[in-house]
Amino acid sequence: MLRENPPRRARLFAPLSLLAVLAGCGARGNGNLTAADTGTPADTGSPTDTSTPVDASTPPVDVGSTPLDVATPPDDAGTPPMDVGTPPMDVGTPPMDVGTPPMDVGTPPMDVGTPPVDAGAPPMDVGVPPVDAGVPPVDAGVTAGYVRTATSATLVEACTLPGAQRVLVDADDASTTLIAPFDLRFYGITVPQSLGLQVYSNGFISQTAEDPIMTFGGTIPSASRPNGVIAPYWVDLFTGADGVCAVVVGSAPIRRWIIQWKNASFYSGRSGAPRVGTASFELIYNESDGSMDFIYEALEGHPTGSAVTIAAVGVEHPNGVDAFVVCPGGRRGGVAPECTAVATGTRFRLAPTGG
């Protein structure tokens, strides 16, 4: 194959060799012929006319240019690696961004930690109701929700006033329901007017109805029913013709609700003469502040036999535990002392300390 396709350089210089031979032959055939006379051969043989071979050799130069151009792509091709290298830098940025979430993620624990602080608040808030509802426990052993003070109130003859309601006439160990003229507040608890209160012939009021035969005497405080007691003079009594009278006086918001036991008698403890003495007293509930006035018109002839009861005076919380006690009550012959704190002409006020 190399013989049939001589090298490019051999093909290039073949015309030059032929011209040289022809020139030699001319010289040998005609020695008198000069180069000037043979203008055509001279032109043909002139080295300057052999520009074609020079032009023919140009392609190698151009061909050589191609490698230069071809080499350029490697330079360009090298650029991508630099560009390709850029992504790693960009890719490296995400780790920084990715690292940011942990910082953000760390924030929730701080926020999550906040709830325990807020969750701790509810006990403080939840503790508020016990203070409101728990007024008695706070005051227990101190004032038990009420404080005893002097009063300027005077006896009101409720049975003689227009609109007075008379109940429990000639009654023994009996009770009835009275509807208050307005809502009451007792130990900080609202007692709706519609609830009604039980009034007993034996000198006390309760928020619950009990068997009156079982309530001829009692003590305060006591877990035994009745509870939620207001006791002007809880003792075994007989009412007379006047019975128990209830009336409201004044105008809102300073009305007064008056309940009067008028001309009752004590149980003597003897079957032949069951009634002795006189007991007239009243309770006045003041709408303005929830205070209560205890006024004693007459306490005369209380028997001293061992079978009779001793008066309980004061107020008792519905829980049967807390109370403001003036006289604890009980039965003579027991451990309860005589009630000497009240007598004819005694009057005082029990004012709420907890609302």
Image (cartoon, rainbow, N blue to C red):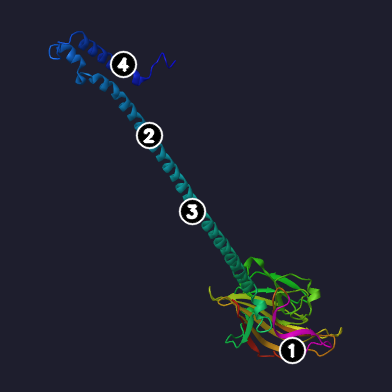
Q: Which mark is residue 96?
A: 3
Amino acid of disc 2 = Ala
The residue indicated by pointer 2 is: 71
Please name which of the two marks, 3 or 2, marks the residue nearer to the observer. 2
What residue span does the magenta drawing correspond to? 320-339
Residue furthest left in the image: 36
Q: Nearer the viewer, residue 253 or 227?
A: 227
Amino acid of disc 1 = Cys
Relative to 179, say whether 50 is above or below: above
N-terminal of the pair, mark 2 or mark 4, is: 4
Q: Which mark is residue 339?
A: 1
Query: Label 3: how many residues lie within 10 Å, few (<14), some (14-19) or many (20+)?
Result: few
Residue furthest right in the image: 271
* Residue 252 percent location from the top left of the image: 53, 73
Please name which of the two marks, 1 or 4, marks the residue nearer to the observer. 4
Q: Which mark is residue 14?
A: 4
Q: CA distance from mark 2 to mark 4?
A: 34 Å
* Residue 270 percent location from the top left of the image: 86, 85
N-terminal of the pair, mark 1 or mark 4, is: 4
* Residue 117 percent location from the top left of the image: 58, 67
The residue located at (67%, 74%) in the rendering is 166
